[in-house]
Amino acid sequence: MVPFRGMMADMTTNLLPPPITAAARLTPALRDRGHAALSASGLRELLHTSAAELDALRASWDDLPPDAHLRDGGRYRRRRHSCFVVDADAVTQVPHRAHWQPLEYNALHGGLERWFEPMHTSVVAAPVWATLLRALSAECSAVKGSQPWYVEAHQFRIDTTDGIGRPTPEGAHRDGVDFVAVILIDRAGIKGGETRVFDADGPAGLRFTMSEPWTTLLLDDARVIHESTPIQPLAPNGHRDTLVLTFRAGAFQGP
């Protein structure tokens, strides 16, 4: 990574594209630097799937309930949440459970059992959903050894209802897991939403904006800190949709 420059630049300036890694180089990139970004075509190559199969999931982001747990009083976030265990080729959805993080990883919302509506059956029953979880879990195993992965899936829509939307209201953070995948689903009528990735043990980092649906950022949570900057409207109904997947060895996080 290289040091940040121009961090206070106007959000309307040219968007910096993500530094794309080829799908065939994903594992060594994660081992070497703790993060890697795939293009939409790279994700399809990794999954051996089509754009149509992935895009069939996108409509479900139009039916996310409001997040009732925002401690900053905002109304800008909608989400659904479900949990899975991936053990080699077996993908099992577990009984619905709360999302929980310790305060050391989320100073704003840590220590709370946050219950969200589960993901639609139509999404988790789609063959491409299990394919996605298996492929990304296999990457986790390639870096940290073959084992079951405890996966939390979060569908997010950040909108500009309040004039500003905050993808990461807790600021730059780690999630207390082994790996994180941030997948862009849609970006419409907004400015901002820049992704920033920092070395956990130093000042170096990089910044870029994911703009193409299905661009995917993979992070080794022990090695890097990440955040996304606030969004502001450029048109009515501006929003940024993402799928965030966390992968943890041993167990889900819990109080």
Image (cartoon, rainbow, N blue to C red):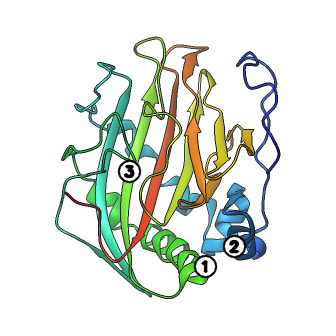
User: Residue 63: percent from the left, percent from the top?
Assistant: 32, 38
| Residue at 82% across, 30% down | 5
Residue 57 visible in this rendered orientation of the protein = no
Q: Is residue 40 above or below residue 173?
A: below
50 sits left or right of 179 in the view: right
Q: Are marks 1 and 3 in contact (CB under 8 Å)?
A: no
Which mark is nearer the camera, 1 or 3?
Answer: 1
Image position, residue 248 (x, y; %):
40, 69
Q: Which residue is mark 1?
A: 143
Q: Nearer the viewer, residue 25 or 144?
A: 144
> Which residue is denoted by mark 3 in the rendering?
154
Q: Is residue 231 left or right of residue 250?
A: right
Mark-to-mark CA distance, 1 and 2: 6 Å
Q: Residues within 10 Å of mark 3 (few under 14, many from 20)?
A: many
Q: Earlier in the sequence, mark 1 or mark 3?
A: 1
The residue depicted at 32 percent of the width and 69 percent of the height is 84
Check whether the beta carbons of the residues at disc 2 and disc 3 lie within 8 A of each other: no
User: Nearer the N terminus, badge 1 or badge 2?
Assistant: 2
Q: What amino acid is found at the position of numbered circle 3 in the picture?
A: His
As shown in the figure, which amino acid type bears the numbered disc 2? Arg
Nearest to viewer (mark 2 / mark 3): 2
Provide residue 125's location: percent of width, then percent of height: 33, 68
Question: What amino acid is found at the position of numbered circle 1 in the picture?
Answer: Val
Q: Which residue is mark 2?
A: 31
In contact (CB < 8 Å): disc 1 and disc 2: yes
Image x and y of residue 196, in percent: 65, 40
Quadrant location of the C terminus? Answer: bottom left
